[in-house]
Amino acid sequence: MSNDVVKVGQLEIRYLVDGSKTGGLGVFELVVPPGANVPPPHSHSHNEEFFYVVEGSIGYSVDNESRELAPGQWMSTPRGSVHAFRNTGTQTARALVVLTPDIGAQYFRDVAEVVNAGGPPDRVKLLEVMSRYGLVAAAPPPATASPPRTGA
C-alpha cells in the first residue's frame, strides 16, 4: 500500500494499514495544524473508531463526554456515537486513528476533492460523500432564543 498523504484542507491523512488487506482493521496517521478546519460533529453507521494522540493536544468529544487529550491518551468512539475533534494547542497535533471496519483511503480522497475545490466546500456534495461511506453529519445544536429586549 502506498503511504501517500491525502490533504483535506489543512489536515493530512497517511494510511499505515489498509483495511482491505487486514480483513477490516485500518490505521491512519492524522496531522492537525492549530486552527485547522476539522470535520463537523458526525457519527459512523458501520465503524468503530479509536483515536490515540501521538503529539500535540486534541480536544475530542464523544456524545456528551469531552476530553483534552495529550500524547499517550486516547478515546474510543462506538458505532453510531456523535464525535468531533479539534487541535486545542498552539503546535501541530498528530494522532493515530484506528477504524474497524476500515472506511478506506478513498473516502478521504473523495472528501479532499470537495474540500480542496476552492472556496467554501459544497455542503451538499460533502454530505453526499459522507453518506456514501456511512457517515452521518450531526444535527446542529438548537438555536437559543434571545430574551426579549426591553428598553426606553
Image (tube, rainbow, N blue to C red):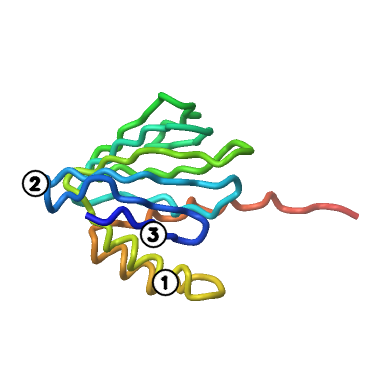
Q: Is residue 120 left or right of residue 138?
A: right
Q: Are marks 3 and 1 in contact (CB under 8 Å)?
A: no
Q: Disc 3 versus disc 1: distance between alpha carbons?
A: 13 Å
Sequence-first disc among 2 and 1: 2
Furthest toward the left, the residue is 23
Sequence-first disc among 3 and 1: 3
> Which marked residue is nearer to the observer: mark 2 or mark 1?
2
Q: Which mark is residue 114?
A: 1
Sequence-first disc among 2 and 3: 3
Q: Is residue 118 left or right of residue 75?
A: right
- Say which residue label 3 marks: 6
- Say which residue label 2 marks: 23
Vertical position of residue 26 compared to residue 61: above or below: below
Q: Are marks 2 and 3 in contact (CB under 8 Å)?
A: no
Label 2 crowd (10 A; few <14 / some 14-19 / many >=20): few
Looking at the picture, tell me which residue is in the foreground, 59 or 4: 4
Q: Which residue type carries mark 3?
A: Val
Residue 65, located in which quarter of the rendered image? top left
Q: Which residue type carries mark 1?
A: Val
Q: Are marks 2 and 1 in contact (CB under 8 Å)?
A: no
